[in-house]
Structures are given as structure tokens and as C-alpha cells.
Amino acid sequence: MKVLVAVKRVIDYAVKIRVKADKTGVEMNNVKMSMNPFCEIALEEALRFREAGKASEVVVVSMGGPQCVETLRTGLAMGADRAIHVSTEIPLYPLAVAKLLRAVAANEQPQILLLGKQAIDDDANQTGQMVAGLLKWPQATFASKVYFGDKNDVTVEREVDGGLETLRLQLPAVITTDLRLNEPRYATLPNIMKAKKKTISKLTPEELKVEIKPDFKILEVVDPPKRKGGVMVGSVDELVDKLKNEAHVI
Amino acid sequence: MISSSAAARLVRRISLKRGSGAACLSSCGISTTTSSRVPSVEEAGTAQSGDSNDWNQHRLTEDQQSFQTLASDFARNELIPFAAEWDEKKHFPVDVLRSAANLGFGGIFCGHDVGGSGLTRADGAIIFEALAYGDIGTTAYLTIHNMCCSIIDRFGTEEQRQTWLPGLTCMDRLSSYCLTEPSSGSDAASLRTTARRDPGSTDYILTGEKAFVSGGGSSDVYLVMARTGADGPKGISCFIVEKDMPGVSFGRQEDKMGWRNQPTSAVILEDVRVPEQNRIGAEGQGFNIALTGLDGGRINIGTCSVGGAQFCLDTAKEYVSTRKQFGKPILHFQHTQFKLADMMTSVVASRLMVANAAAALDAKTPWATPSAAMAKRFATETCFNVCSEALQLHGGYGYLKDYPIERYVRDLRVHMILEGTNEVMRLVISRHMTKKL
């Protein structure tokens, strides 16, 4: 069984994000980039499937400019068998990524498509769901446990606001991973060296017959407002009034 | 519901065998009491912020960048959160060392056939610097262990390599290097531990005492330089002594200024029977073996100093950008800016000295030994001063154990002394400069 894992290159989680002076975005120059932590968890889960004998091949895919190759190499160093780079300089948003992933999945025919539940840069939490819709595959998002059944199915425990939900899905299926699913492994020095011999194949949106154009235009990026001091209120009525008319939360 | 990036930060703090996030916070020295005027360690931001840039990427190959990322991540997740607690409790984190060995850090320079990673000295310098950034004591021990493995790898017979190295490169067994004695430090060739042949067998009987052994008491395998022949360097041979051989005992654990999470003790040998197959190299080759090992060891110690200094520099830079006096962050004063500039220059210079020595050693040049001596002498002195300056920039807070700076100062002080004092380094350099005269 083949598992396809989609990974995204994002600003490293530990970096202090700074908004650019011209407010067009955040400072990306000279800033440390890494694989999205939820994508790492997805890749780790795929590697565990292979180690448990459930999967025979783990393929990582990433979309974007040439720097994606760094992230794919990290994926190979963690243990993926091969990588696919969908090369484009057009800014990508979840729907475009989902369309590209559909095309890659159509070529690769994986039984499971794994993604992180969201990226830590846009926190969109959309791509997995969209690609499942486009592929017309069942989906289980926010997975915190995955078990294999014996009828070409998987059982997934999901973390939802109300608690844990358990779903059983017929394969092929889309699963997006949540924090507590696993703890990703480090690459090892020998695996970093071995990764050099693994293939990274390159595709373009044209070759995949997917037309993409940005469906968003960023108007402005600003810092969140500085935290103001608290205020003591005299009565419940005053509190309700402030919540309604100042904070606008009710 | 915490944001996903805060969640990602949380998962990194909880590593495989550790406790809860709260335990991690207190153990990395972050004070959780806040005062309105004092920038807490969290506000000042430690060098964990990922903003650290050593202006060195252009010199790294693609592979070296991957090695560096791996080592940095390991340092960030497995070392930084626990280093303060290990220092305070004098805890030797063997399990973390084994995790490091699982990634290939236990036998970086050794052959693949014995579980090594087969990398160059240049690669090693990059890896050890990134690890030292997180914790000096643990990394320094790791470099010593690697030095012992390299000695066996290079000078051991095929049988010795296969017997000893697989267990060492994965750090199932830990190793230590025993050259110094109570009465022979810088004058190492005057060592008095003897190894006499047992008449009627091929065994040696070892008697003597080794001092200041890093890993003493904890390590399983000890590389002991002992006298088999006449006085002077040519009478010394190298032996592998195991911890549980009869006659082996250890002095009490030394109570040190720094490197406190590393055991250090005397190793006492009383008529220890050591089989001939434990002798590494020929009789009389021991001193040469010891010094060859030290070439790499000196580069590694220099590298640890660089990593520690980079951490202190990054931390100081963050601190001075938030600490306000006289109405502005102290970063805004030119004197502070000049101090930072000088510190950065010192760290880069030290790093380049170490890289130069590593390259000279990799290329097997005749000047590898003095290059390593220069790198060690320069980097250990310079980087200690950088850390001391960083402490000064923190003002009174630099003196408190709540902040990590003072630990780096304590840890780096010994780098000017061990693996050959900086004074001996000057002897080595000048001798190599003048040896044909």
C-alpha cells in the first residue's frame, strides 16, 4: 500500500514573527524555515505504517518554489522513500494546493493521503478537507489515533471540541493529523546521507493539467493590537455593557 | 484553544521520556514570577527564539546544513530545557547521550562498518558547535567519547575495532580517556602508571592513578596511557581497561566549577590484569596515539567554546534589546552596540580558526597539530571572554542562576585548561614553527 504525505515549508515555529514595515506580509528574509510541525507528525505516522508492515512505500510531496526541495530532503532524511516537488512560483492557497494534490494523487494512486491538520503560518485548516472533497474520498481530520482494519479500512480517533470521535473509513481516504498522534523522529546522520540517493521528481502545474491562480489578494498584514491593561468593573451590568459595546464580543 | 504555533512549541518541550511542560519551564531556568520592571527570561527571550544567525551558512555544504539543523533541533529540544537542572543536580544524562548516539552522534568519525557515521572533522565541528549551543557539559563529554572511538578506529587492529566499536558508537558503553595523573599534567610524558608484562603470560599488569578523568566512574571503557618501557614519551603504550576488571577503582566524584553534569574522578589501577589484545597499537606508540587523539579533541573543545559563546551572544543581544535604563533599551547606547560587534567578531574568528584546523586535519597536512593547538588556544580564550562579556551585559541578572549565562561562563572556564593547557598550546605552536631551526 502506498501512502502519500503532503508537507509544507513554513517559518520555523520558534522564530519571533515580525510584520514587514510596508505591511504586505511578514518578514521572510533570512528567517529560519522548517517543515510544518503537523506535517512532520503526518510523515512520522506514514513511516510507522511502513514499519508496521501496513504500507510499502511512503512518498512525500510539496508545492512551491525551489526551496521546497530542502523540506523534501528533510522528509527523505526522516525516512520517506521518494519525493515529488510540484514546482511553481505562483502564491498558493488551500484550494490550489488541493487541486494539485488531487492531480498528484490521481497519478500516484495512494491508499492513504496524509496531511497535517493545518499549517502554522496561515492556520487555514482547509487543504485536507478540500482535497478529500475533490477526490470524493472519505476524510478524518484532527486524527489522534489511527488503526488499521482488515477490510481495507482504517479507524481514526479524532479530537473534536466535544471530546473524541471515532470514525471508520473505507480506503482510499484522507487523514489530517493532530498534535497528539505521535512524536516525530529526528533524521539521523546516516539517513541524511542516504537521502541524497533518493529521487525527488519534479512536476509543474501545467504537466498536472491544473490551472492555478491566486484566489486571494492580501490587502494588509498588521500586528495584533497591543494588549491593554485590565479594568475593574463595578457591576455585572457594567461588565455586560463593556463586553457588548467596547470589546464587541457579545 | 491554544494557537497551533503555541501548540507546536508545547509538543517540542515534551520530549520522549520527560515530564510535563511546567517541569520543563522551571528546569530550563525560566523564572515564572514576573515583576513589572524586570524583564523576565521569557520576555528578554533566550536564544531559543530561532532568530539566531551565525552568518555562517555560506560556508556549509547542503549536507552540513542538514547536519546542523539536526544537531540544533536536538539541542533545542533535548538539551536546552534540561541543562540547568542537570547542572544543579549534577545529573549525567546518559539516556540523552544514547538518544544522540541513535542519531549517529556517538561515533561521528568512525567507519560505517562499526556503527560510525564516517564524517569529516569539518562536519564534526559543525555538529558539536550546534550541540554545545544547548549544553556544554553534555556535548563536551560526547566529544571525548568520540575521541576515544576515533583512537580505536584509527589505531586498533581489525579485531579490536570489531570487538569494541559497535558497542561504543551506539553508546551502549561509554568511554573515557586517561592520560593525566596527579603528578603529570602538562608534563604528560612523565606519567608514572606502569604496565609490566606478567612473566609466563602475555598479559600486562597495570598499576597507577589517573586524575581528572571525564566520565570517571560512569564509563565502561577507559583508554589508559601507561609506561611499558623506559622514561619519556617513547616508553608509553595505550591500553583498553574495562570498568569491572579486578583492581580498577574510582576516586570520589570531583566537585567542579562547571561541567557539573559530567562525572569526573580519579581512576585507580591496582595490579589490574589487562590482556595483550587490549593494547592499542605497538608498545611505545601510546604517547603518539594519545597526542593524535588530542588533535581532534582540541578542535572539538574549541568548537564547544564557540557554540557556548554563540548562545551567550544571542542571549545577551535579546536581553539588551528589552532591558531599559535611562529611558531606552540599553541596546541603543553605542557602547553596547560596539560590545556586541566585538563579541560577534570574536565568535566568527574563533569559528574560522576551528574550521581551519578541522580542514587541515581532514587534509592530513603536517600542520594539523599546530593548527588544532592554535584553534584551541584562540577559541577557548576568546569565547570565554565573550561569555563573560555577555554576563556583564546582563548586569546583576547575569550573576543569577535563574539565567543561563553564568553556567556557560563556569562551563567554558575549564576549556582553557584541559586537553592541554593554553600554555602548552603555545609550546606546541612555537615548536612546530621552529623545529627546523
Image (spheres, coloured by chain):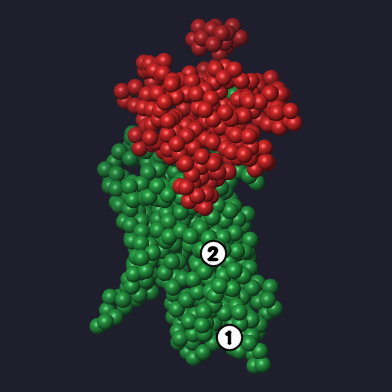
Chain colours: A red, B green
Quadrant in the picture for the C terminus of chain A: top right
Q: Which residue is mark 1?
A: B195
Whole-percent x, y for residue B170 in the image: 59, 59
In this orientation, which residue lies closer to the viewer: B189 or B365? B365
Camera sees residue B61:
yes
Q: Which residue type carries mark 2?
A: His
Identified at 51% across, 76% down, the residue is B179
SS at mark 1 in the image? strand
Give the quadrant of residue B255. Answer: bottom right
**Kind of residue at badge 1:** Ala
Front residue of B386 and B351: B351
| Residue at horizontal 56 percent and vertical 60 percent from the top | B115
The chain to which mark 2 is attached is: B
Q: Which residue was labeled with disc 2?
A: B145
Count of numbered marks: 2
- Residue B411 spot, x, y in % from top left: 48, 59
Between A4 and A24, the one nearer to me in the picture: A4
Nearer the observer, A158 or B129: A158
First in sequence, mark 1 or 2: give its number: 2
Q: In the image, is A153 to the left or to the right of B310?
A: right
| Vertical placement of residue A238 versus B246, above or below | above
Q: Position of residue B281 (x, y in %)?
A: 52, 79
